[in-house]
Amino acid sequence: MSKELFYIIDQISKEKGISREILLEALRSALLSAARKKFGGRTNIDLNIDPKTYNIVFFETRKIVMSVADKDEEISLNEARKISPDAAEGNVITLPLDLHDFSRIAAQTAKQVIFQKMREAEREVIYNEFKDKVGQIVSGMVMRKEKSMYFLNLGKTEALLPIKETLPNENLKRGDTIRAYIEDVKITPKGPAILVTRTSPQFIAALFRMEVPEINDGLVVIKDIVREPGERTKLAVFTKNPAIDPVGACVGMKGTRVQSIVRELRGERIDIIPWTDDPRQLVSRALSPAVVDKVGINEETKTAMVVVNDQQLSLAIGKRGQNVRLAMKLTGWDIDILSESEYSKMRIEEADKTFSPPSADA
C-alpha cells in the first residue's frame, strides 16, 4: 500500500506541479474524514502518515477515568495501567486503532475528498502562478470556440479569449497558436479564470517590450500608445540617452522588430514617433505618415490648427478620420486640419475683412 501510495503521490506531484506536502495533507484529511465517519463521527480518532515510508497509522485518544461513562471517549485507570504503568487519572492515553475492515463506502469517501483536495490545490497553484503574470504576454493554442469565447491551451490550464477581444475579421481555428495579453486573473467557483485580450493598447506595448531590448531594459520608454485594433496604432517613444535612436530601436534592422509585431497583428499599421514636450512638434509628428507644413496652437483651449499640402490632406485625416482621431488621442490636443488652398483662401478672406477701402466722399 505504501509503495503504491508513494507512486501515486509522486506522479501527481510531477504532473500537476503540486508539492508532496500538500498532497499528503490532502490524503490525511481524506482518510481521517472517512475513518471518523465509519466510527460515527468520533473526534478522538486521528492518524499519522510517515512522510518517508508513507506508512499510515490510525489511533484514538481516551481520557483516563476511575469509572467509565463513555467507552468511546474514556478508559478506566486499571485498563490504562495495563498499557502504560505510569498512567494517571485525568491524563490522556493514545491507543492504536485497527481498521482492517475499513469499508468500501469509507474508502470511496476518502477517494472523493482526495480528488477534491487535489483540485483545490491545483487551482491554487495555477492561480498563484498566473496572478503575477497580469500585464504579460502568453502564447497559447486555440482548443475550441464556445459561443462568444475562445479557449486557449496554456499547458497547465486554459485562458479565456472573448471574441470581442480578438482583432476585427480574425477567425481563429482549432490548432492556431497565438499570443495574447493577460488582462486579469479571477477566482471563480470552477477555478481560476485567466482573461486575455488581443485588442488592448497594452498588448502592443507588451509586444514591443518582448521584441525591443532597449524598451525591456528601460533605455527607451513608451510615453503613450493609442490604437484602433486591426487598423492602426500610434506609439510615442522617448529616451534620455542621446546615443540611442528610440524610433530606430523599435523599428529594428531593416524593420525586423516592428514587422514581427505587425505579423502578429495581422497587418495592423504601426506609426512610431519620437516624443517631445513641444506641442507643435508633437502634433506634427502624431499626424504621421502625413507631412505637416504649419502648426498653430492655442494653449488655453488646447486646440491646434494644422496646414498640409493639398495632396497630403486625405493622408493626414485618414480613412474615416482615423489618423487625425488617433493623433488627437495621442497628443491630447483637438486638431483641425486645413489644406494649403483652404488656408490661403481663409487668409485672403481675413485680409479682405481687415482692409476697408476709403469712401467716395473722402
Image (spheres, rainbow, N blue to C red):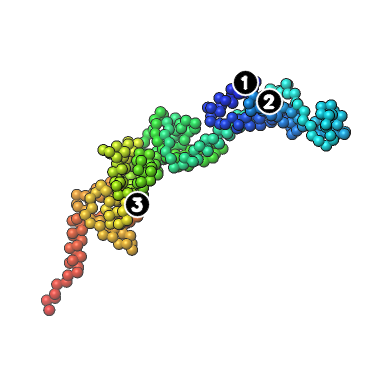
Near mark 2 (Cα within 10 A), the count class, few <14, some 14-19 or many ≥20, is some
Q: Is residue 238 left or right of residue 185?
A: left
Disc number lying in front (3 or 1): 1
Q: Is residue 179 left or right of residue 38?
A: left
Q: Which three-letter amino acid code belongs to the residue tagged 2?
A: Ile
Which quadrant of the structure image shows residue 282?
A: bottom left
Near mark 1 (Cα within 10 A), the count class, few <14, some 14-19 or many ≥20, is few
Q: In this figure, which residue is indicated by the disc labeled 2?
A: 56
In the rendered image, residue 290, in percent from the top left (x then y), is placed at 24, 49
Q: Which three-letter amino acid code belongs to the residue tagged 1?
A: Lys
Disc number lying in front (3 or 2): 2
In the rendered image, residue 341, in percent from the top left (x then y), is placed at 18, 56
Q: Quadrant of the C terminus?
A: bottom left
Which comes sooner in the sequence, label 3 or label 2?
2
Give the total number of marks visible in the rendering.
3
Q: Residue at x 25, y 50 (%)?
A: 316
